[in-house]
């Protein structure tokens, strides 16, 4: 019987086979990375995100309650922005809410400076996340010229620009109203939006109708004052708020 001998591969053949196996493995790995979802797909291209104000149509609210001999009023404005890379396209929405709080006594005097709180929420559908942050914004010194650098033809208001309510504390009736408008203005920061909040309030006490014993209420104080908040639309950011005098008297 003739014996068949199997020739052992030499060193060169082994090296060729190993190189072929490595090439196949590298090609498979590259294909897997190419076909896998990219984490960059949920982020704006580059680091610059630009926002544009889109609404809502009726974002202004006002609430007043009596706490003992105090009145607490909160005016709140909700604004929505579409944001994305400067090159174009929307990748996220931002919800910016401004809360202006006033605490007054029954004489209509502020017992502390107005306070401003901001709530910012970012919705990123690509990442599937909603993240929110709250902060208190220090009130700047009074601004005697809140419309400095503003263009008259940029005046605008929300669709429902006025809110009003009434509360009673220790027999004193307080009615307060806020209205909201804004202008686009030149500033050292570039083009900004000046959000103008004007408050009007009336305080009344119990009295009687002249010449009779019929009970009624009579105004004893009427007051108007304002808060201006500066907004950078491209950043969807409120950068500062300050009181201003709105009364002509």
Image (spheres, helix red, strand yellow):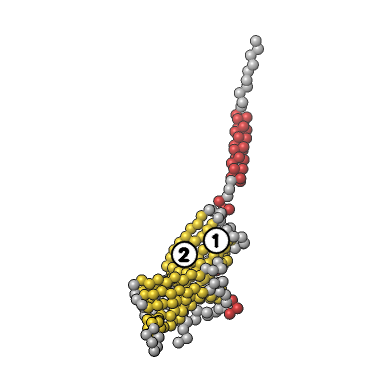
Disc 1 secondary structure class: strand
Q: Residue at x 57, y 62 (%)?
A: 83
Which of 58/166 is in front? 166
| Residue drawn where x is 54% and y is 69% of the image | 58
10 Å crowding of disc 1: few (<14), some (14-19), many (20+): many
Q: Is residue 10 above or below residue 4?
A: below
Residue receiving disc 2: 119
Q: Image check: 130 left or right of 173?
A: right
Residue 69, percent across and down? Answer: 34, 75
Residue shown at the point (37%, 85%) measured from the top left: 213
Q: Report helix, strand or loop for mark 2.
A: strand
Residue farthest to the top?
Answer: 1
- Residue 120 locus on image (x, y percent): 48, 63
* The quarter of the displayed image where residue 88 is located: bottom right
| Residue sitting nearer the eye, 193 or 77 | 77
Nearer-the-camera pick, 159 or 219: 219
- Can residue 122 be seen from the camera position used here? yes
- Looking at the image, is mark 1 or mark 2 earlier in the sequence? 1
Image quadrant occupied by the C terminus? bottom left
**How many C-alpha atoms fall within 10 Å of the one at disc 2: few (<14), some, or many (≥20)?**
some
The label number, if any, that marks residue 93 in the structure image: 1
């Amino acid at each position: 019987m003739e014996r068949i001998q199997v020739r052992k591969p030499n060193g060169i053949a082994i090296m060729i086979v190993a190189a072929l196996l490595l090439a196949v493995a590298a090609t498979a790995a590259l294909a897997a990375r190419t076909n896998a979802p990219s984490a960059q797909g949920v982020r704006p291209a580059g680091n610059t995100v630009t926002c544009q104000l889109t609404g809502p149509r009726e974002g202004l609210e006002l609430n007043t309650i009596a706490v003992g001999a105090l009145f607490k009023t909160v005016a709140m404005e909700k604004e929505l922005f579409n944001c994305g890379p400067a090159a174009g396209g929307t990748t996220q929405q931002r919800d910016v809410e401004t809360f202006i709080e006033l605490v007054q006594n029954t004489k209509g005097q502020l017992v502390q400076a107005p306070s401003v709180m901001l709530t910012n929420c970012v919705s990123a559908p690509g990442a599937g996340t909603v993240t929110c942050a709250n902060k208190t914004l220090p009130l700047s010194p009074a601004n005697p010229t809140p419309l400095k650098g503003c263009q008259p033809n940029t005046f605008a208001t929300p669709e429902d620009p006025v809110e009003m309510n009434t509360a009673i504390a220790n027999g004193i009736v307080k009615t307060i109203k806020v209205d909201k408008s804004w202008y686009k203005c030149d500033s050292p920061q570039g083009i900004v939006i000046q959000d103008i909040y004007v408050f009007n309030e009336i305080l009344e006490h119990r009295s009687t109708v002249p010449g009779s014993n019929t009970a009624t209420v009579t105004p004893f104080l009427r007051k108007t004052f304002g808060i201006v908040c500066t907004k950078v639309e491209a950043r969807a950011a409120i950068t500062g708020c300050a009181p201003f005098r709105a009364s002509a008297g």
